[in-house]
């Protein structure tokens, strides 16, 4: 802000100076410095804006008090320049009228003054006053100077003033005029048109100031001078004619570019990609416009204004589109953030949890991936971040799944060893006589057994039966009935389930497993009972028949235990549901009470 403040202050002080013309270069310099600073500042702010993830087309440069003060002083300056220009035009018109009056006065001297001394005094007075008068309109200068030179020549010839001039003056004037011819000849080699124009006029002014020369030499040097002058005038005219033609062609090119932008403005774009492609095309046209030179002055501002307005209209239309989709993109972003949170819940797994339903969770992950594809895209910046996060969680889940199943066999073998060790502990255990302490010990064995996890399928039934038998023997030392034994042995399992995040869901899952196991065992029992039909003619002491009956009885016993466990699970599930219902009713009652109190207020 300090730079802008100093520049505005300097501009303000310069505008107060009395000598405006001397201050004008410094004013122009100050204005250019301010514009350059603002442009550099705009580029920095735009870079920061884009770095934050926003689109450059949405960027708007902030305007502060110094920008407004600068614009006020700049407009005041332009007003002063305009006023000076208008005053200059008026002054030049007035000067033209004055010089026309002097031409009439000189013509009066030529025609009516016969006394050489008086005529010469009048002539000198007219020349002095002519020189003292300022500039005239440029379009009238040539004709006026031509008439002035003509009158001067008439003056010298018509009143016979040459008779009074010395021969050396005529010779001197001849040399001076010849020198101007040499300078004019050299000027024909100049390529800088502005330089030609400036020096051409200066040489003409000097020519007009030089007095007469020898009459016999006059026509020759005059013709040489004006031939060269005409060459230079033709060169200047040709230059400006070329510019004129180029400007006409530039005008055609600019009109064509305007039509191109119009075609992109009139099209309908339904996607960000379509808009971005069209924007690239329009920006390319804008860059092409910069490479095209000026059009004719009377058209240049108009075509630029039209081109600028059409470009602004295009970007306003684009801005409106992006504003309309910004809300959608925000919704898509929120939807995908919710999917990520769901995905986190699903994939937050314990690699050591052998009971984990990998198949079910995999299907849930796949379902979320499908939902992700069906949700529209968020903004490009957000979409990339969200997708990286979503993909990383998915990749992590499937990597964990691969690791889990690669180590599954070894873990189950290790679990089998651990469970065998637990069985040995149970078999060696002896009751202490303190029932509370003994029950705690047996419950600890059950927890240790459950914690050991899954074992290979082929060993599952055998190891479970061995543990159950060992535990039954241990409970037998406490003189407890079988139902009581099952309740206490299963109590540890229920505690583990209740400690999970969603205990009700964990209990339901355990109940489903028991139900599936019971269904499977019932199928086995039916098959074994069917097989007994093959022993219908066998004697009761047949070892195969005895073994088959023993297996059926064992299966029935396990099924009864499963029923009892289901009963225990139902009790806990009903208790949790009842607690949740009470909590919900209390929350509803508090809400109703609050509404009633507010109504009373």
Image: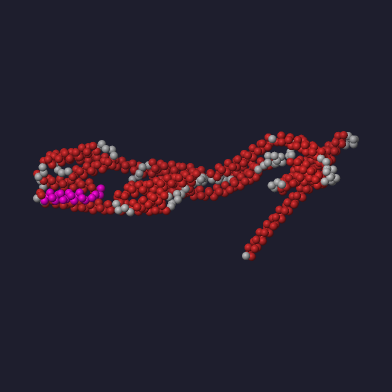
| Image colouring | secondary structure
Q: Give the percent coordinates (x, y) of residue 71.
A: 38, 52
First to last magenta residue range: 118-139
- Residue 306 in view of the camera: no
State whether the magenta stretch is mostly helix, strand or loop: helix
183 up-or-down from 59: above or below: above
Residue furthest bottom in the image:
600
Going by the image, does 599 lie left or right of 19? Answer: right
The picture quadrant where one finds residue 359 is top right
Q: Is residue 469 magenta?
A: no
Circle count: 0
Q: Is residue 473 left or right of residue 249?
A: right
Which residue occupies the foreground of this view, 535 or 388?
Answer: 388
Q: What is the x, y in percent for residue 337? A: 59, 46
For the residue pair 291 and 501, the one nearer the viewer reads as 501
Is residue 131 part of the magenta span, yes or no?
yes
The residue at the point 21 percent across, 51 percent down is 133
Residue drawn at x 66%, y 38% is 401
Q: Quadrant of the C terminus?
A: bottom right
Residue 549, image x, y percentages:
85, 38
Image coordinates for residue 109, horizontal then vertical, percent: 13, 51
| Residue 520 shows in this picture | yes
Residue under the image location 64 percent in, 40 percent down: 397
Instruction: Pick the residue in front: 209 or 485.
Output: 485
């Amino acid at each position: 802000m300090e730079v802008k403040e100093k520049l505005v202050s300097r501009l303000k002080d310069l505008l107060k100076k009395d000598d405006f013309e001397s201050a004008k270069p410094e004013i122009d310099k100050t204005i250019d410095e301010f514009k350059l600073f603002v442009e550099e500042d705009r580029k920095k702010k735009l870079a920061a804006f884009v770095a934050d993830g926003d689109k450059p087309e949405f960027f708007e440069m902030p305007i502060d008090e110094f920008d407004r003060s600068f614009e006020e002083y700049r407009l005041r300056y332009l007003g002063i320049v305009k006023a000076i220009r208008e005053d200059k035009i008026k002054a030049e018109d007035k000067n033209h009228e004055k010089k026309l009056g002097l031409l009439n006065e000189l013509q009066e001297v030529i025609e009516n003054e016969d006394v050489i001394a008086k005529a010469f005094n009048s002539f000198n007075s007219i020349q002095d006053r002519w020189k003292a008068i300022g500039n005239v309109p440029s379009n009238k200068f040539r004709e006026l100077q031509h008439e002035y030179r003509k009158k001067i020549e008439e003056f010298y010839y018509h009143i016979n003033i040459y008779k009074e001039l010395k021969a050396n003056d005529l010779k001197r004037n001849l040399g001076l005029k010849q020198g101007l011819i040499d300078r004019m000849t050299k000027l024909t080699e100049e390529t800088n048109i502005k330089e030609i124009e400036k020096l051409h006029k200066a040489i003409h002014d000097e020519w007009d100031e030089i007095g007469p020369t020898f009459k016999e030499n006059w026509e020759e040097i005059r013709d040489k001078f004006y031939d060269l002058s005409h060459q230079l005038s033709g060169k200047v005219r040709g230059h400006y004619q070329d510019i004129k033609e180029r400007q006409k062609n530039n005008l055609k090119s600019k009109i064509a570019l305007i039509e191109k932008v119009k075609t992109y403005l009139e099209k309908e774009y339904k996607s960000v990609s379509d808009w971005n492609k069209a924007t690239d095309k329009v920006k390319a046209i804008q860059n092409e416009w910069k490479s095209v030179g000026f059009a004719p002055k009377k058209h240049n501002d108009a075509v630029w204004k039209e081109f600028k307005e059409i470009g602004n209209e295009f970007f306003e239309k684009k801005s409106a589109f992006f504003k309309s989709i910004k809300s959608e993109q925000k919704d898509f972003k929120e939807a995908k953030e919710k999917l990520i949170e769901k995905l986190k819940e699903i994939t937050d797994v314990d690699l050591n949890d052998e009971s984990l339903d990998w198949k079910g969770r995999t299907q849930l992950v796949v379902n979320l991936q499908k939902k992700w594809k069906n949700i529209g895209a968020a903004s490009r910046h957000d979409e990339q971040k969200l997708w990286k996060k979503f993909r990383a969680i998915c990749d992590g889940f499937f990597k964990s799944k691969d690791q889990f199943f690669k180590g599954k066999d070894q873990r189950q073998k290790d679990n089998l060893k651990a469970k065998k060790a637990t069985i040995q502990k149970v078999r060696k255990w002896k009751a202490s006589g303190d029932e509370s302490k003994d029950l705690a010990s047996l419950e600890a064995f059950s927890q240790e057994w459950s914690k050991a996890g899954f074992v290979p399928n082929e060993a599952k039934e055998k190891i479970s039966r061995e543990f159950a038998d060992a535990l039954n023997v241990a409970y037998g030392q406490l003189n407890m009935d079988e139902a009581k034994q099952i309740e206490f042995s299963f109590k540890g399992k229920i505690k583990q389930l209740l400690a999970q995040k969603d205990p009700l869901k964990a209990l339901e899952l355990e109940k489903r497993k028991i139900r599936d196991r019971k269904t499977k065992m019932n199928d086995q029992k039916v098959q074994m009972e069917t097989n007994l039909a093959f022993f219908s003619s066998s004697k009761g002491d047949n070892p195969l028949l005895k073994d088959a009956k023993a297996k059926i009885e064992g299966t029935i016993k396990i099924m009864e235990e499963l029923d009892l466990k289901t009963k225990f699970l139902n009790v806990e599930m009903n208790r949790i549901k009842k607690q949740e219902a009470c909590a919900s009713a209390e929350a509803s009652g508090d809400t109703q009470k609050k509404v009633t109190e507010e109504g009373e207020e």
